Amino acid sequence: MIFTKLGLAIAWLLVVVSGLRVVAAFSIAYTTGQATAPRYFGSKTTGEVIDQGLLYLLIGVALGIVAEISRSVAVKAELRKQNLE
């Protein structure tokens, strides 16, 4: 059960941090342009930052789905164990 909780925590962290990074990249791209992207993100363009952020966002969602499946299986196994006793 510890891996399920850890997976959920990591999933939430990935979704929140990558979401903030994507929003920041969009705001910098539309307000100051591409010239300040290396200063704030360390990459050449804000497009790269947006791509990486969306990738990590999808990984976080996938990890969250897997953790929810794990939690559901654990609950069903516990109920089955109680019914057999």
Image: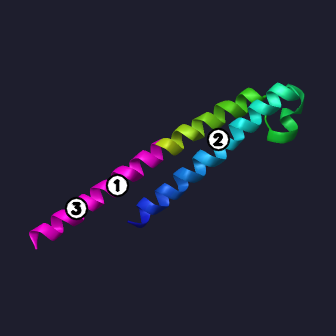
The amino acid marked with disc number 1 is: Ser
Mark 1 to mark 2 CA distance (whole Å): 24 Å
Which residue position holds label 2?
A: 19
Which badge, 1 or 2, comes first in the chain's sequence?
A: 2
Residue sticking out furthest to the left: 84
The range drawn in magenta is: 62-85
Does residue 37 show up magenta in the picture? no
Which badge, 3 or 2, comes first in the chain's sequence?
A: 2
Question: Is residue 63 found left or right of 52 in the rendered image?
Answer: left
Which residue position holds label 1?
A: 70
In this picture the colour scheme is rainbow
Q: Is residue 82 above or below residue 21?
A: below
Q: Which mark is residue 18?
A: none
Nearer to me, 72 or 52: 72
**Disc 1 + disc 2, Cβ < 8 Å:** no
How far from the left and from the top, in percent, is residue 62? 46, 42
Q: Identify the residue shown where x is 84% and y is 41%.
A: 40
How far from the left and from the top, in percent, is residue 17? 66, 47
The amino acid marked with disc number 2 is: Gly
Mark 1 to mark 3 CA distance (whole Å): 11 Å
Q: Secondary structure at mark 3?
A: helix
The amino acid marked with disc number 3 is: Ala
Q: Is residue 44 visible?
A: no
Which residue position holds label 3?
A: 77
Numbered disc total? 3
Q: Secondary structure at mark 2?
A: helix
Q: Is residue 85 above or below residue 68?
A: below
